[in-house]
Image (cartoon, helix red, strand yellow):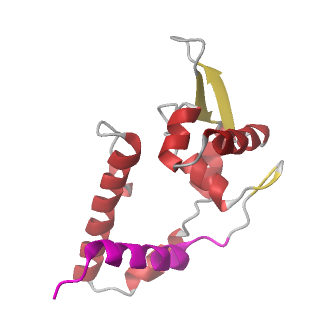
């Protein structure tokens, strides 16, 4: 009897996340950045800005909660608020240069731990695992950013 794929994903993701999560201390001039704050920064597209409402919707949190998170990230110099030139009533959120550097250098995922995880797989398992995760990531991006979302970038794309 086939297993429920939803249950399999629900059970597997926390195990995978715990195994590859970075244990690095992420500090800024304003102090330590939480995993949740890093997740918020990771939701911001480096090219296209987001509004507070869009970001709260993607993260599935209330606007006041996101507003507090964004304020802390702005004060820490990791996020910028810019007025939309086309509609001055809209405020657009963008990663600051420091926020981009933090994400690039201190991902919540430890590349060394991912490398060790992949090294323990056969080539066929590795290919299937990477393809499966990439497929799920594309679907997640469409779910959180909409059907016209920019595609997931991989190392091969860069």
Q: Residue at x 30, y 77 (%)?
A: 126
Front one among 111 and 108? 108
**Magenta-drawn stretch contains 105:** no
Answer with left or right where residue 10 lies relative to residue 40: left
Vertical position of residue 63 compared to residue 126: above or below: above
Q: Is residue 156 above or below residue 120?
A: above
Seen in the picture, residue 120 relative to 148 is either above or below; the reply is below
Residue 26: x and y, percent? 72, 60
**Residue under the point 27% across and 68% down:** 132
Q: Is residue 138 visible?
A: yes
32 horizontally vs 2: left or right: right
Residue in front for this viewpoint, 3 or 104:
3
Boundaries of the magenta span: 1-23
* Residue extending furthest toward the right: 30
Q: Does residue 156 appear in this view?
A: no
In the displayed structure image, the side of residue 8 where residue 107 appears, left or right: right
Q: Quadrant of residue 129?
A: bottom left
Quarter location, residue 34:
bottom right
Q: Which residue is at the front of the view, 121 or 1?
A: 1
Whether the magenta-drawn stretch holds residue 20 is answered as: yes
Which image quadrant for residue 76?
A: top right
Residue 94 percent across, percent down from the top left: 59, 33
Q: Residue at x 58, y 54 (%)?
A: 39
Residue 30 image offset from top left, x and y in percent: 83, 48
Residue 20 lies, in percent from the top left, at 52, 74
* Secondary structure predominantly adopted by residues drawn in magenta: helix
Residue at (66%, 28%) from the top-left corner? 81
């Amino acid at each position: 009897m086939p297993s429920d794929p939803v249950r399999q994903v629900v059970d597997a993701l926390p195990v995978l996340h715990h195994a590859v999560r970075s244990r690095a201390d992420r500090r800024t001039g304003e102090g330590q950045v939480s995993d949740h704050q890093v997740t918020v920064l990771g939701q911001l597209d480096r090219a296209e800005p987001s509004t507070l409402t869009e970001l709260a919707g993607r993260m599935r949190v209330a606007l006041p909660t996101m507003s507090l998170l964004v304020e802390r990230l702005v004060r820490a110099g990791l996020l910028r608020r810019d007025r939309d030139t086309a509609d001055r009533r809209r405020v657009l959120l963008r990663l600051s240069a420091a926020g981009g550097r933090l994400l690039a250098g201190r991902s919540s995922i430890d590349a060394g731990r991912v490398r060790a995880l992949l090294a323990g797989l056969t080539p066929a398992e590795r290919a299937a695992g990477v393809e499966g995760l990439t497929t799920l990531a594309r679907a997640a991006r469409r779910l959180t950013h909409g059907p016209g979302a920019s595609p997931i970038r991989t190392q091969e794309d860069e």
